[in-house]
């Protein structure tokens, strides 16, 4: 038993303490969080726009009067559909590498590139979450808005969206957690995220167990932390409703 | 509802059964859970770990992995009477695979370093390793010492000797940033795209990269000169055998012939 403990200690020191290797993990963590948060903001922004377009198309198309805006809506909805299909139909690693090597080929800021790519990717999924939320609101709510004299936009603004936000919070939280772990492939484009930091340590110490366990543990702690935050938020929202 | 539940349960069991069966077979690059070898008793195959993104040392040619290291490995295996099996993986994973016994030897233009010698055994050297610097034509970096000046970003392959040199010499002093790529060829792509200002990599590989990418050039003075050797698990019994084979191959000129085949000196 003694030797196992000594071995464990030696491994721990070699992997994390020697030459300040733990700093790789710290920097990697910082980059992962930075990318995730940026991507989240971009994703939600894109998601809202697309969800509104799509659900307006689905709910309102017949009721629209002007021919011009009907055609415009159809066009925009079509673009959204293509975007959704492509993003959801290709692996995020491929999207990332396409972004890095082809689309944003002149940029030197790989963290920004990764954030934009993951944001665009996440936006597709967030859009569907929000659209699902909107579609699930009882039609009676829309009618109530109309009976109050609200136009479509004001109905959305004052009646529908607040309810949608409360409903979709669990799904959005889930998406955030998925996003956090998704960014682990950033290493493919030389971004030093948490996973890559673990790879770097593994490459210099040649031991797989410690770096991998440490990285997994850090991801786990982060996910648990954010999950807890979200459940507190959810509870506050629910209490507010009473 | 009962019928649906039964059907669902059956479906889940079927899925589990299928995925269980997939567990037993197959072991591609990252090596599955194969529990054979590591027994000194009856080994008939030498498993070589490499990263086939490193022409002319190891690279893909029409589905096959070929190159200097591959031919050296084959020559050694033939001399010692083993079959050769090649496993292709990320360069940074090779030595990990070696220390866990998933491969018997790592041959991927490994340079002998003290740091590595702490965890793996090296055979005798089988070639000279020169690290050079690739820059874009017309770059303001004109020799190795100017790398220290400008806060440049240098692309290297993760865990390679280039990585170690640049990290220890430059990044540790805060003189540059290091971009570490999994594949050696990605470093050249980054350089061409302007994402990196320089690449530090093995000489012969650098020549190939410059051939295949526009507008790149190699700096005159080399960054470092070292030696290549084959890596083996610490305390492996194979080290002596392979050293013996290498001796013979050097003596009868086979080794030189392999190098000449792939490296044309201008």
Image (cartoon, rainbow, N blue to C red):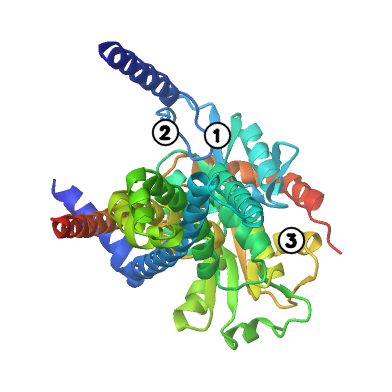
**Which chain letter matches label 2?**
B
Circle nearer the N terminus (3, 1) = 1
The disc label shown at residue B209, or none = 3
Q: What residue lies at 41% left-to-right and 26% top-to-bottom?
A: B23
A59 or B186, which is in the foreground?
A59
State the SS at label 1: strand
The disc label shown at residue A9, or none = none
Residue on which disc 2 sits: B38
**Which chain letter matches label 3?**
B
Circle nearer the N terminus (2, 1) = 2
Q: What residue lies at 87% left-to-right and 64% top-to-bottom?
A: B266
Residue on which disc 1 sits: B46
The quadrant holding residue B237 is top left
- Using the numbered discs, state the Cα–Cα distance from disc 3 to disc 2 in whole angstroms: 37 Å
State the SS at label 2: loop
Q: What residue lies at 64% left-to-right and 47% top-to-bottom?
A: B52
Circle nearer the N terminus (3, 2) = 2
A122 or B133, which is in the foreground?
A122
Report whether A233 appears left or right of A62. Answer: left
Residue B128 appears in the picture as rendered: no
- Using the numbered discs, state the Cα–Cα distance from disc 2 to disc 1 in whole angstroms: 11 Å
A154 or B216, which is in the foreground?
A154
The x and y percentages for residue A152 are: 45, 57
Q: Are marks 3 and 1 in contact (CB under 8 Å)?
A: no
- Using the numbered discs, state the Cα–Cα distance from disc 3 to disc 1 in whole angstroms: 30 Å
Observer-side mark, 3 or 1, equals 3
């Amino acid at each position: 038993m003694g030797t196992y403990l000594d071995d464990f200690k030696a491994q721990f020191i070699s992997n994390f303490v020697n030459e300040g290797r733990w700093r790789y993990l710290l920097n990697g963590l910082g980059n992962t969080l930075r990318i995730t948060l940026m991507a989240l903001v971009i994703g939600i922004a894109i998601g809202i726009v697309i969800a509104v377009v799509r659900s307006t198309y689905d709910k309102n198309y017949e009721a629209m009067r002007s021919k011009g805006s009907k055609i415009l809506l159809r066009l925009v909805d079509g673009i959204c559909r293509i975007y959704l299909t492509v993003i959801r139909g290709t692996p995020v690693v491929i999207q990332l590498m396409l972004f890095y090597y082809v689309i944003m080929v002149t940029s030197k800021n790989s963290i920004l590139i990764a954030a934009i790519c993951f944001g665009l990717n996440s936006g597709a999924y967030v859009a569907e979450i929000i659209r699902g939320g909107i579609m699930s609101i009882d039609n009676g709510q829309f009618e109530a808005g109309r009976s109050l004299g609200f136009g479509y936009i004001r109905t959305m603004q004052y009646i529908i969206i607040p309810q949608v936000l409360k409903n979709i919070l669990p799904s959005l939280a889930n998406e955030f957690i998925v996003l956090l772990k998704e960014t682990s492939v950033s290493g493919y484009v030389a971004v030093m995220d948490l996973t890559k930091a673990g790879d770097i340590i593994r490459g210099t110490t040649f031991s797989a167990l410690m770096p991998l366990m440490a990285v997994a543990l850090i991801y786990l702690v982060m996910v648990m932390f954010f999950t807890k935050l979200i459940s507190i938020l959810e509870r506050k929202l629910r209490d507010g409703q009473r | 509802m009962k019928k649906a539940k039964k059907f669902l349960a059956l479906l889940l069991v079927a899925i589990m059964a299928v995925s269980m069966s997939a567990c037993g077979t197959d072991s591609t690059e990252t090596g599955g859970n194969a529990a054979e070898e590591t027994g000194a008793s009856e080994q008939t195959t030498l498993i070589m770990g490499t990263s086939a993104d490193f022409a002319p040392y190891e690279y893909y040619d029409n589905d096959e992995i070929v190159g200097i290291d591959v031919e050296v490995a084959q020559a050694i295996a033939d001399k010692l009477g083993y079959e050769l099996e090649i496993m292709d993986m990320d360069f940074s994973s090779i030595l990990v695979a070696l220390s866990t016994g998933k491969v018997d030897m790592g041959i991927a233009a490994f340079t002998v370093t003290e740091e590595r010698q702490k965890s793996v055994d090296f055979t005798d050297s089988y070639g000279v390793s020169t690290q050079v610097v690739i820059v874009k034509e017309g770059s303001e970096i004109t020799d190795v010492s100017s790398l220290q000046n400008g806060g440049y970003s240098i692309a290297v392959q993760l865990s390679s000797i280039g990585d170690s040199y640049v990290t220890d010499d430059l990044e540790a002093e805060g003189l540059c940033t290091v971009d570490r790529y999994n594949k050696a060829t990605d470093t050249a792509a980054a350089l061409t795209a302007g994402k990196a200002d320089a690449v530090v990599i093995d000489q012969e590989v650098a020549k190939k990269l410059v051939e295949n990418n526009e507008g790149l050039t190699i700096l005159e003075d080399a960054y470092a000169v070292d030696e290549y050797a084959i890596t083996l698990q610490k305390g492996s019994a194979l080290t002596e055998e392979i050293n013996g084979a290498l001796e013979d191959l050097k003596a009868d000129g086979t080794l030189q012939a392999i190098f000449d085949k792939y490296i044309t000196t201008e």
